[in-house]
Amino acid sequence: MNSFPKIRALTLDVGGTLIRPWPSVGTVYARVAARHGLVVDPGMLHQHFAAAWRQAGEFHYSREEWARLVDFTFTACGAPPVGESLFAEIYDEFREPRVWQVFDDTRPALEALSAAGFSLGVISNWDDRLRPLLERLGLDKYFETLVISCEVGFTKPSPVIFAHAARMLGVPPGQILHVGDCATRDVAGARNAGFQAVHLARSGHDASPAGIPTLGELAGLLGH
């Protein structure tokens, strides 16, 4: 059954939707810190990073904002403030495909949607590390356009970033389905911009009645 009969294009979020840090942000932070002679528990780092991320509020994904967030994460664990050398190495580490996991359902879903004739795009709150990362992960080939907040100057849920994606795809907003894991930035943001939207709730928690647990559900929703 096609729940979205007028859809011509899909846009997808990236973090938490297509990929995730691997094995965790805290583990990556701890591994890099150890190379600088600093031993910090990965679990504590991950816990404090998650808390800092939830409290970050308006975040524009600048290098300076990341530096403050990383510093807060370490000092909350009782570690000394993060110097420029350690931060630079942490920042660069997240450019590397080895610290990201492509979800098992990502490539099959993108292949199926492409084969069905849908135009695909990305709408992501990210910095200038995203384009080369998607290329190195082999995911960029699926998308006609990558709309990234650092390039547009607006972050989701602003309607501006969604409107930009619609223009780049050449498809009216009402005929675009946006998929993402955040009910506020992705679902509400997309709908406020005139898009249709689906909430991807991978954990199974906080899913709306119209939500899906995996990207593999998309083809069925679209009648393919």
Image (tube, rainbow, N blue to C red):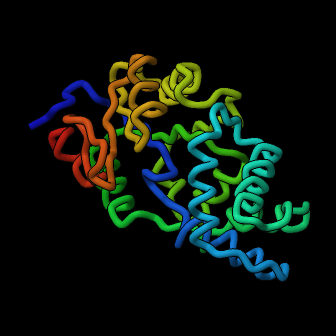
Q: Quadrant of the C terminus?
A: top left
Whether 158 is drawn above or below 82: the answer is above
Question: Residue drawn at (51%, 51%), measured in percent from left and top?
Answer: 15
Image x and y of residue 123, in percent: 52, 37
Image x and y of residue 191, in percent: 38, 21
* Closer to the camera in the image, 221 or 62: 62
Quarter holding residue 158: top right
Image x and y of residue 37, in percent: 84, 82
Quarter holding residue 42: bottom right
Extreme residue toward the right, this view:
84
* Closer to the camera in the image, 38 or 154: 38
Extreme residue toward the front, this view:
78
Image x and y of residue 156, in percent: 55, 30
Q: How many numbered marks does the figure carry?
A: 0
Question: Residue drawn at (16%, 32%), measured in percent from left and top?
Answer: 3
- 114 sits to left or right of 69: left
Whether 101 is drawn above or below 55: the answer is below
- 87 sits to left or right of 131: right
- 132 sits to left or right of 3: right
Q: Quadrant of the N terminus?
A: top left
Question: Residue drawn at (19%, 40%), measured in percent from left and top?
Answer: 221
Quarter holding residue 61: top right
* Closer to the camera in the image, 217 or 175: 217
Extreme residue toward the left, this view:
1
